[in-house]
Image (cartoon, rainbow, N blue to C red):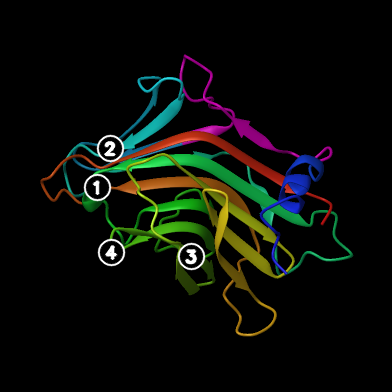
Amino acid sequence: MSIDERGRLEYLIKNTSYGLPYLMETWQDPLGIPPAVWATATGGTGPGTVTWSIAEEPYHKVILAGAGNDDDTSRLYTVWQWQLAPGLWGINTFNKLLIMEWEVKMANVSEMDNATCFLGLSAVNNATRASDDIAGFILTGDALNCISDNGGAETVAAVGGPTLTNWNKLAIISYRNVIEFWVNEAMQARHTTTPAPDEDLPDINAHGMFYLDQEALGTGLAEIHIGEVSIRPGVLL
């Protein structure tokens, strides 16, 4: 059974991270993005940019943006890593759960490269949608989808139709043999290994990863706005 939307999910969120390394980022530091926890990378002709902003109060946020060139890239990712191991967690493991959730909105989605943009968890710190060993959210036909990839084998599913230019809350919830993908407090997809078919769940040390690749179609600059972010493991399920 999946984690239900009432009661049990709230219980897990409140009671599963005793003493474990968790992250709760509200972007409170007016000097910028905390370098002990987060790293950034930009590239391309522009190049792309990653900036801290309170231009939309009360949101504190980080904006990933292109500069209008089709090679502009911007990346925000955690220096820290968390265990994502739905294929290994069980009665002999301490960790049994990982939750990542964040607030996000986008601008000029048609300017984003669907082949590479990615939001979620990744095994390497330079991951894109095309990388192996990822779990998170992607774009397909400029619509939000989710993906789990294990060594290059992948499962992709639609996640409803949220308006991407609004603020949305996205979540990845993983436990034994399961990765769930949630949008605005509702589960939209559930990938499993048991029962068959195997839906390609990775077992990795995972970075939190946000990556934007500008397509430059001429209608505006692509942007991904990242609000509050939480990543927390759990020991109870």
Q: Which residue extends farthest right? A: 92
**Pointer 4 residue:** 141
Disc 1 + disc 2, Cβ < 8 Å: yes
Amino acid at dot 3: Ile
Between disc 3 and disc 2, whose residue precedes? 2
Mark 4 or 1: in front is 4
Residue 5 in which image quadrant: bottom right
Return the mark for residue 48: 2
Give the structural element (helix, strand or loop) at label 4.
Answer: loop
Q: x and y percent of residue 73 in the render?
A: 30, 44
Q: CA distance from mark 4 to mark 1?
A: 15 Å
Residue 23 in which image quadrant: top right
Main SS, magenta residues: loop
Amino acid at dot 1: Gln
Give the structural element (helix, strand or loop) at label 2.
Answer: loop
Residue 186 in which image quadrant: bottom right
Badge 3: residue crowd in 10 Å (few <14, some 14–19, many ≥20): many
- The relative height of residue 6 versus residue 50 in the rendered view (above or below) is below
Q: CA distance from mark 4 to mark 3?
A: 14 Å
